[in-house]
Amino acid sequence: MANENSPLLAYRLLGEDGVAFSANGAGGPGGESARKLSTFLGVVVPTVLSMFSIVVFLRIGFVVGHAGLLQALAMLLVAYFILALTVLSVCAIATNGAVRGGGAYFMISRTLGPEVGGSIGLMFYLANVCGCAVSLLGLVEAVLDVFGADATGSSGFRVLPQGYGWSLLYGSLLLGLVGGVCTLGAGLYARASFLTFLLVSGSLASVLVSFVAVGPRVIQLTPRPGPNGSTLPPQVGHFTGFNSSTLMANLGGGYAKDYTTGAMMTFASVFAVLFNGCTGIMAGANMSGELKDPSRAIPLGTIVAVAYTFFIYILLFFLSSFTCDRILLQEDYGFFRAISLWPPLVLIGIYATALSASMSSLIGASRILHALAQDDLFGVILAPAKVVSRGGNPWGAVLYSWGLVQLVLLAGKLNTLAAVVTVFYLVAYAAVDLSCLSLEWASAPNFRPTFNLFSWHTCLLGVASCLLMMFLISPGAAGGSLLLMGLLSALLTARGGPSSWGYVSQALLFHQVRKYLLRLDVRKEHVKFWRPQLLLLVGNPRGALPLLRLANQLKKGGLYVLGHVTLGDLDSLPSDPVQPQYGAWLSLVDRAQVKAFVDLTLSPSVRQGAQHLLRISGLGGMKPNTLVLGFYDDAVPQDHFLTDPAFSEPADGTQEGGVPALSTLFPPPRAPGSPRALSPQDYVATVADALKMNKNVVLARACGALPPERLSRGSGGTSQPHHVDVWPLNLLRPRGGPGYVDVCGLFLLQMATILGMVPAWHSARLRIFLCLGPREAPGAAEGRLRTLLSQLRIRAQVQEVVWGDGAGSGEPEEEEEEEGDFVNGRRGDSEAEALACSANALVRAQQGRGRGGGPGGPEGGDGEEGPTTALTFLYLPRPPADPARYPHYLALLEILSRDLGPTLLIHGVTPVTCTDL
C-alpha cells in the first residue's frame, strides 16, 4: 500500500466523512441511530408491495386472457429471469462491503465512478418521482371508478365529483398523506408499509379462497362503446369453477383489442405490461441507510420477496386459467371483485397496493436524492436535500421530492410516462449488472462477496436483457434515456467529481493492459512498426515546458516518460523523498496536456539516476528507446510557468479547494552562476551511457524560442510558412563517408518526418541538405537521396551545398578521417573548433537563404521576408572514447549549434526505416 494509514485499519472507527460506522455499513444519514429496520420490514415488505403494485389485482386477467396460460407462464419466467439476474448482481455488490445510504445509486457510483453513477442515480431518482405520481394517479382513477359521479360500472356510490381539477385535488391530498408518512421517518413508513402489507395479503387471501369457495356464476359485463358513438350489445362472462375444458380453452393465445385503449395486443405489448408491474426489486435496497445490517438484509430480503411474488403470480395465473373463460378475462380486468366472497376487500387491496407503491417510490426517491446531495455532484441545486432531523431522517430530501411529485401531478394523465419510468428503472438495473460485471472482470483481490451465486455470465446476460427490455417496451424512451445519461455524464465529467471512491475502470484497464503487455513480445518487433519511445530527463519543469511539449509531438503514439532524478541516498534518509513528488508531476502532465508517464528515482548522482531510468523505465515491450536531454549551455533558464496560460494560478498560491498551486510544488529556475546538479563531464557521460545501452539520443537546444502555436495540440496551418531543416551528415567529419545512407542519418529523416505528421507542423516544408564531398560530382548524391526518399514515402526538398573552402583541403591520397578524428582530438583542438565554426556558419547561411537572403545570409537579399527555419535537425557525433575529451566534445557541440535557433542534435543507433510493404 502507498500509505500505512489504510482505511481498513480504522474500518470500525471512521467513515469517509468522519462519520462513525461499523462493518455492517452504518454511516448513512444519521449514523447508527438511524438504522432500525429489520430485513422483513426494511426489505421484504417494500419489495413485495412494489413488485405487486396494482398489477396483481387489475392485470392478471389481461395477461392470461390475451396470452393464454402457456405464453403467460413463459412471459413470467422470462421477466423473473431478467429480474433474478439483477438480483444476483445486487446481492454480490451488497455483500462485498459496507453499503451506505442511497441503495442502487451508492452501489453504482462507488463502482463505476461519480460520472456514470451520478447520471444514473439522478435518472433513478426521477423514475421514482414519476413512479410515485403514476401510482397516485392510478389510485385516484381506481377510486373514481367506484365512487366517481361519472362512474359507468353497475355498482358504485357515485359521490365524488370528477374532472381534471378534482383529480389533481384528490392526488394532492393523497400525496400529502404519503409525504407526511415519509417525512416522519423510516420507522413510521415501515409500520405503515407493514399495515398495508397485511391488507394486501388479506385481500389476496380472500381472492385465493374465492377461487375455491365460489361456485360457477354468470357475470354481466359493462357494455362497451361501438363505432359511431353506438353501444355494443352487453356481454357476459363465465366463472366456471375448476374446469378442465376452461383450462384447455385458456392454454393458447387469443390476442384481441384492449378495451381500455382500443389497441390490438401482441406478445410484446402484453409482456411489457407484465414486466412494468414487476420492476420493484430495488425498493428494499433504496432503504440501505435505515437497515440494521444492509449487507445481509438486502440480498436475503430481496430474494425472499422475489420468490414470494413469483409464487403468487404463478398461483393466480393457474387459478384464473382453470376457472374463468376468455371473455371474462379479456373484457373485465378487475374480475377479482366479481368472483370475490366480499368485493370490498378486493377494493381495499387495490387501494393499499397503489398507496404502498407511491410511499415506496417517494421514500426511495428521497434516500437517493439525499445520497446525491451528500456527494455534492450537482452543487447547490440539491443543497436543500442535505437537511436531516436529529434522528437522521432526511426530511429536506422528502420535501424536495414531494414538490417534484406535485409538479408531475399537474400533467394529469401519465399513461405515456409509465413506459419512461420503467425504462429508467431498467437503466439502473443494467448499471447494477454492469457494475458487478466490471468488478468480476477486473479480478480485483478485494472483490470477494460472501454471496457467490453469480458469475460474469449472469452479469453480462443481465445487462443485455435489461437493454433488450428497454427497447421492447419503448424504443423512443430507451434511446432518450441513454442520450440523457450521456449528457449527464458529460456534465459531471466537466464539473469534476470525487476521486477517492475508486474507479473500477482503472482496475479493468490494469487487467487489460497487463494482459496485452504480456502479449507484446519484443522478439517479434519489426522495423516496419518502429515508433519513438522517449525518456525525457527533466531537472526543473519550470524551465523545460517547451521541450516537454515538443517531445510529446515527437512520440508518434509511442511511449513517453518524464524522468527526474532526486539526489540523495536512501540510507541516510528517514523515508523515500520521491513518492510524495509524484502528485506534483502528474498534475504537471495534466496541466501541460501531454500524454506522458512519470518515473522518478533517487540516486547519488544524476548520471547514475539516468542509468537507472534507462534500464527500468517502461514494462515489457514498452520501454524507452530514445533518451531526450536539454542542451548543456550557459543560457539563463526561463520560468515558463509565468508566461504559459495553462499554468496561470491565483496570487495566493492555492487552487480551488485549498490545493497548493503547481508553481509552489517546483523550485524556481536555477539562478545565473549557481551550481548545477550535473557537471559537463557527467552530461556527456550520460550521452555515452545511453549509446552504450543501444538507446538513441536527442539533445534539444533553444526550444524556448519555438512559438506557442508550434507546440499547441491544434493545427498550425494559419501561421507563417516555415522550414524544418535536416542535416543528415556528420558536419564534424568533413570528408566522404556513407553520408545520408548510414543509420543515424536515416534516423534524423524519420524523426523529422514524424514531426511533420503533427497537426501543428503540417505546414512545415522539409528541407534536406547534402554536403558535396571532394570526389562527388554535383547531382549524384542528390539523385540517390531522392530515390531513397521516394522509396521511404518522404516528401522533402533536397539541396546540395558546398562544404567550406578549407574543409575539404588535404592531400587526396590520404586516407579518409575516421568519425572521431576531430572529436577525439587527433586533428587538434583549434582545427576542430574551426571546423565546427565553419559548419555552424554553413547552417546559418542556409537558414538565411530561407528568409530570402543571398548566399551570405540575410544581408545579401533584397529584404523580402521568406519562410523561416522553425527547427533544425543536426547529426550528433558519438562522444569521444577518452572521458578526458568530454568537455572539449561539449564545446564543439556548443559551437556547432550556436545561434541556430531551436535545434535538435540527434544520434540514432537503431534502424527505423523500411522500404518493404
Image: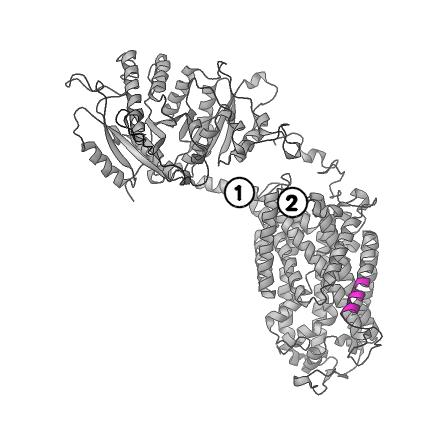
| Residue 509, disc | 1
Q: Is residue 411 visible?
A: yes
Q: Tell me residue 788's x, y (percent).
A: 25, 37
Of 636 and 916, nearer the camera is 636
Disc 2 packing (10 Å; few <14; some 14–19; many ≥20): some
Image quadrant holding the C terminus, namely: top left
| Residue 265, disc | none
Horizontal relation, residue 264 to residue 644: left or right: right
Image quadrant holding the N terminus, namely: top right
**Residue 69 shown in magenta:** no
Q: Tell me residue 732's x, y (percent).
A: 28, 21
Of 163 and 500, nearer the camera is 163
Of 860 and 641, nearer the camera is 860
Query: What's the coloring here?
Result: one colour
Q: Please give the name of the residue rendered at 80% of the width and 65% of the height, measured from the top-left corner.
A: 169
**Residue 162 shown in magenta:** yes
Mark 2 lies on residue: 110
Horizontal relation, residue 915 to residue 106: left or right: left
Q: Could you tell me the amino acid type at mark 1?
A: Leu
Residue extending farthest front = 862
Q: Tell me residue 505's x, y (percent).
A: 57, 44
Q: Tell me residue 409's x, y (percent).
A: 74, 63
Q: Could you tell me the amino acid type at mark 2?
A: Arg
Q: Which residues are magenta?
A: 154-173
Q: Please give the name of the residue rendered at 44% of the width and 36% of the height, measured from the top-left corner.
A: 709
Q: Is residue 868 above or below residue 879?
A: below
